Amino acid sequence: MTDTPTDRMTLNDWLTVALSGLAPEVAARLRAEYLGHAQDMLEAGEPVGAVLGALGDPARLNAELRERYLTEYEAKVIAAHSRAWSARAVWGPLVMGVVGTLAVSVLNPAVGAWALLLPLLGLAGSGWLWWLARRLPPERLALRGSSALVFLQAVMLAALQGVNSSRPELFLPLFVGAAALAFAWWEYGLNGRLHAKLGR
């Protein structure tokens, strides 16, 4: 008869393997759940080996849990986003738009009325950030708000380049569209998995 992976494990060993690498708050919650379930079985007279066998292979479970819940690394990523976001960030795009208009109007007077698009874009961007800040809980705001801020900064810089170009009617939508595509790839590709996990 061959040994199973849990034959020589204690309950604490099993929990250590099963919850390895998960975010601390997630690991603490799941640890309490599994301990409660194991305690019920032990109080019913089940031996430790049978309890661990019923709980399953801890390494396989760990891989499944990492797919469903935040890992320790992902929690650190969100914490870094939290530090990058602040309430004052909401006004960043509008300030960039006003400063950009003044700079372009002074350095390149031939731009004319195209420069007025910059504060309008900035106002729209600040309005979007304000809406996000009122709608999203802190963790999701840290992730989406900080990436939205990066996106809007890229849009404002792209718009500034487009307005200041020789053909703003061509380059402005081209540059802004490229920034939007980059944001979509970042938010729904790289960050999409984190958003899904935060929804659990």
Image: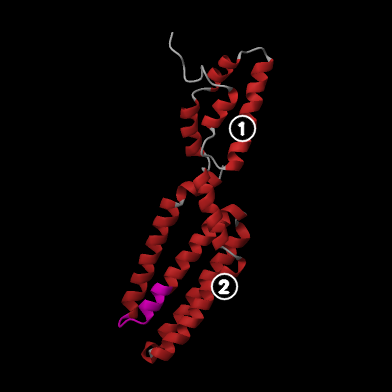
Q: CA distance from mark 1 to mark 2?
A: 42 Å
Image vertical order of residue 45 relative to residue 119, above or below: above
Could you classify mark 1 by the number of other residues whose Cα lies within 10 Å: few (under 14), some (14-19), or many (20 or more)? some
Magenta segment, which residues? Answer: 157-167
Could you classify mark 2 by the number of other residues whose Cα lies within 10 Å: few (under 14), some (14-19), or many (20 or more)? some
- Taking the image as shown, residue 69 lies to the left or right of residue 168, namely right
Quick one: SS at disc 1?
helix
Q: Mark 1 is on which residue type?
A: Arg
- Taking the image as shown, residue 161 lies to the left or right of residue 53, namely left
Q: Find out whether residue 120 is within the magenta segment.
A: no
Q: Give whichever of discs 1 and 2 has the lower sequence position.
A: 1
Q: Quadrant of residue 108?
A: bottom left
Q: Determine which residue is flagged by label 2.
A: 91
The residue closer to the viewer here, 146 or 1, is 1
Question: How far from the left and from the top, in percent, is residue 199?
Answer: 55, 45
Question: How far from the left and from the top, in percent, is residue 72?
Answer: 52, 44
Tell me which residue sits at (43%, 89%) in the image. Answer: 105
Name the mark nearer the viewer: 1 or 2: 1
Tell me which residue sits at (54%, 34%) in the image. Answer: 19
Question: How far from the left and from the top, in percent, is residue 51?
Answer: 58, 18
